Amino acid sequence: MSRKQYVETALPGSRNGNYVNIYEDRRHLSNNRQNFMSDQERMAKFQQFIRRYEINATFAAKLRGLDGYEIVFICDDSGSMNTELSDVSGPYNQSPTRWDELKQTVSIVVDLASTLDPDGVDVYFLNRQPMYNVQIHNQ
C-alpha cells in the first residue's frame, strides 16, 4: 500500500480531502539518495548519542526498534508558545519561553531520530511551512 493510499484509508470521513493533498506533501521531491546516511554512519551516530546522554542498554535497544520508520514531529508554533515558563527562572536570567523549551527538546530528539530514519525526519508546524529530511538539529 502506498503512503497516499494509507493516508486516504486513515482519514475516511475527511470532507476536505486527504492529508497528503491538504498539506501539499512535497517530501518526494527531495528524495536525493546522496543526502541519506549509510547504515554504518547511522549506527555510529546512534552509539555516540547513547554515550552522550548516558542512555542505558535496555532503553537503547528499544529505541533501535524505531530504525527505518518515517519519523515526523508536529510542533506548536502559535503565539502562546511565547509564554514564559514560570517554574524555570533565576534572579539574573530572563525566564525561558515554551518556544525555547520546545526548540531545546526537538533539537535533542531530532539528533536521535535522524540516526533511526535514513532520510532524516520531517518537522511540521501549525503555522508555517514544514521542514523535510532534517538530519541535524541546527538545519
Image (tube, rainbow, N blue to C red):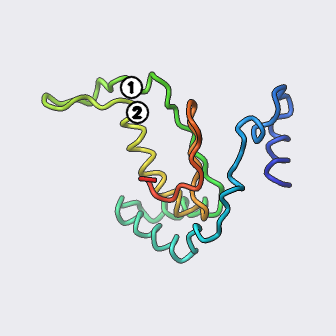
| Residue hosting label 1 | 82
Residue at point 41%, 64% (across, down): 50
- 129 on left or right of 11: left
- Residue 118, placed above or below residue 101: below
Quadrant in which residue 70 is drawn: bottom right
- Residue 21, placed above or below residue 59: above
Instruction: Verify CB contact (< 8 Å) between mark 1 and mark 2.
Output: yes
Mark 1 and mark 2 lie on one chain; the one further toward the N terminus is 1
- 35 on left or right of 93: right
In this view, the residue in front, 90 or 97, is 97
Residue at point 55%, 60% (across, down): 62
Q: Quadrant of the N terminus?
A: bottom right
Q: Residues within 10 Å of mark 2 (few under 14, many from 20)?
A: many
Q: Name the residue type under label 2.
A: Trp
x and y, in percent, of residue 48 in the image? 40, 68
Residue at point 52%, 70% (across, down): 42
- 96 on left or right of 76: left
